[in-house]
Image (tube, rainbow, N blue to C red):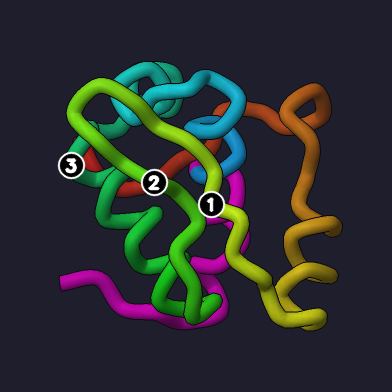
Amino acid sequence: MMKNNAMDYLPRMVIFSRVVELGAFSKAARELGLTSSSVSQHISALEAILGTTLLHRTTRKLSLTEEEVSPSSRAALEKAPSSTTREKITMRGR
């Protein structure tokens, strides 16, 4: 089971960003050198930290929710690095 500590917050935001940009857990997992299961666990942990569901998941489709995120969480989301400025992250998973 994954811990939900502050040190894991930013890498999980990077993973979330790549999932949204690429439109699939499996594509993000390949790019980040993680398993799809690990990516899913990181997204679930981020949702638990933020207290909201970020993605609608089905077997065929992935989409953002329209849930309201708290102002402090929104500020953190806006400060996350963009995909054009970050290097491949190093995480445990594979």
Q: Based on the displayed image, in which of its 4 quarters is residue 30 positioned?
A: top left
Give the labeled residue for mark 2: 56
Q: Earlier in the sequence, mark 3 or mark 1?
A: 3
**Hey, what amino acid is under mark 3?**
Ser
Give the labeled residue for mark 3: 37
Give the labeled residue for mark 1: 65
Q: Are marks 1 and 2 in contact (CB under 8 Å)?
A: yes
Q: Position of residue 93 (x, y in %)?
A: 24, 43
Q: Earlier in the sequence, mark 2 or mark 3?
A: 3
Q: Position of residue 11 (x, y in %)?
A: 54, 53
What distance separates the C-alpha of mark 1 from that of mark 2?
6 Å
**Hey, what amino acid is under mark 2?**
His
20 on left or right of 62: right
What kind of element bears circle 3? helix
80 on left or right of 55: right
**Hey, what amino acid is under mark 1?**
Thr
Majority secondary structure of magenta residues: helix
Based on the picture, tell me whether residue 4 belongs to the magenta stretch.
Answer: yes
Q: Earlier in the sequence, mark 1 or mark 2?
A: 2
Q: Which residues are magenta?
A: 1-15
Q: Are marks 3 and 1 in contact (CB under 8 Å)?
A: no
Which one is in front in this view, the residue at disc 2 or the one at disc 3?
2
Q: Position of residue 64 (x, y in %)?
A: 54, 43
Q: Residues within 10 Å of mark 2 (few under 14, many from 20)?
A: few
The quarter in which the C terminus is drawn is: top left
The quarter in which the N terminus is drawn is: bottom left
Q: Residue at x 18, y 28 (%)?
A: 59
Q: Nearer the viewer, residue 89 or 54?
A: 54
